[in-house]
């Protein structure tokens, strides 16, 4: 797969945001600092005020130079596939559509 080296002049902009750990309690390992569900809710609120939420398909098309984004956009990703991501992130994201 060839990815264009520079999309600077392309329509729209894309910000990628990855969340690693979302939980209320502290994580038992040093150097890992989770955010709480309320912090996630606050961050998503701020991002949604400033960016259009992109789908994986829209982001892929933009990165590959096949399509432009209609506005500055953000793609949210959740690392590690933890069960808490499914449950907690869904609780935060579903009400937003």
Image (cartoon, rainbow, N blue to C red):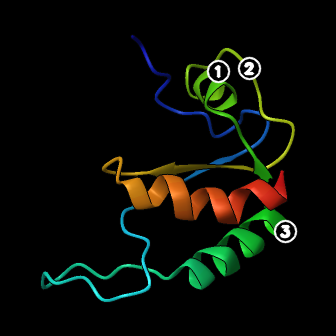
Q: Which residue is at the far left?
A: 30
- Mark 1 highlights which residue? 61
Marked residue nearer the N-terminal end (1 or 3): 3
Q: Quadrant of residue 21?
A: bottom left
Q: Which mark is residue 12?
A: none
On screen, residue 40 versus residue 1, left or right, reads: right
Point out the frontmost of discs 2 and 3. 3
Viewer-proximal residue among 1 and 36: 36
On screen, residue 45 versus residue 5, left or right, reads: right
Residue 58 visible from this viewpoint = yes
Marked residue nearer the N-terminal end (2 or 3): 3
Q: Disc 2 on helix, strand or loop?
A: loop
Q: Position of residue 50 (x, y in %)?
A: 81, 66
What residue is shown at x 82% (from left), y 60% (from top)?
Answer: 95
What residue is shown at x 79% (from left), y 63% (from top)?
Answer: 48
Q: Position of residue 46 (x, y in %)?
A: 75, 75
Asked if the residues shown at circle 1 and circle 2 are in contact, with their CB atoms under 8 angstroms apart, the answer is yes
Viewer-proximal residue among 70 and 27: 27
- Mark 2 highlights which residue? 67
Marked residue nearer the N-terminal end (1 or 2): 1
Measure the C-alpha gap from mark 1 to mark 2. 5 Å
What residue is shown at x 24% (from left), y 82% (from top)?
Answer: 27
Vertical side of 72 occupied by 6: above or below: above
The N terminus lies in quadrant? top left
Few, some or many C-alpha atoms within 10 Å of disc 3 (few <14, some 14-19, many ≥20)?
few
- Mark 3 highlights which residue? 49
Point out the frontmost of discs 1 and 3. 3
Asked if the residues shown at circle 1 and circle 3 are in contact, with their CB atoms under 8 angstroms apart, the answer is no
Vertical side of 91 occupied by 55: above or below: above
Q: Which residue is at the far bottom?
A: 26
Q: Position of residue 92 (x, y in %)?
A: 68, 66
Q: Disc 1 on helix, strand or loop?
A: helix
């Amino acid at each position: 797969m060839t990815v264009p080296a520079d999309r600077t002049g392309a329509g729209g902009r894309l910000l990628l945001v990855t969340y690693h750990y979302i939980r209320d309690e502290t994580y038992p390992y040093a150097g890992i600092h989770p955010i709480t569900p309320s912090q996630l809710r606050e961050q998503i609120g701020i991002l949604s005020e400033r960016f259009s939420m992109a789908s994986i398909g829209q982001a892929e098309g933009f990165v590959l130079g096949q399509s432009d984004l209609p506005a500055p956009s953000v793609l949210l990703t959740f690392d590690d596939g933890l069960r808490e991501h499914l449950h907690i992130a869904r609780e935060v994201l579903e009400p937003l559509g």
